[in-house]
Image (spheres, helix red, strand yellow):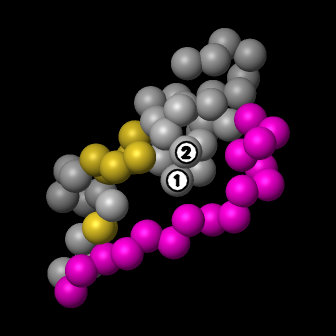
Amino acid sequence: MDSKGNRCKVCDGTGLLSDDEGWQYRCSVCNGDGIFGKEDENKPARIMEVDENNRLLD
């Protein structure tokens, strides 16, 4: 998304991640906008919930 090199390396700038079953969810590192900025550095990690089959509950 951003040509300045601030693109989120975790989601490759898409803002989405996917699990091993192909379910997509918002990137917890950049908060879904695809850009990793200074404001993202100070945010605490978001703990995601899973069900009994280890599927993400977003």
Q: Is residue 48 left or right of residue 6?
A: left
What amino acid does circle 2 point to? Asn
Residues marked 2 and 1 touching at CB (< 8 Å): yes
Task: Kindly indicate the quadrant of the structure image that contains residue 6.
Answer: top right
The residue identified by callout 1 is 28
- Residue occupying image coordinates x 24% and y 80%: 51
**Residue 12 appears in view:** no
Q: Amino acid at mark 1?
A: Ser
Residue 34 place in picture, x, y as percent: 54, 32
**25 relative to 9 in the view: left or right:** left
Asked if the stretch drawn in magenta spans residue 44, the answer is: yes
State the residue at coordinates (63%, 65%).
45
Residue 58 as seen in the image, left or right of residue 34: left
Q: Which residue is mark 2?
A: 31
> Which stretch appears magenta?
37-52
Q: Is residue 2 left or right of residue 55?
A: right
Q: Which residue shows up at 40% across the image and 40% down it? A: 16
Percent across and percent down for residue 4 are: 74, 16
Residue 29 position in % (x across, y down): 59, 50
The C terminus, quarter of image: bottom left
Please tell me whether mark 1 sits on a helix, a strand or a loop.
loop
Q: Secondary structure at mark 2?
A: loop
Residue in view at x 69 percent, y 64 percent: 44
Q: Decide if residue 43 is in sight here.
A: yes
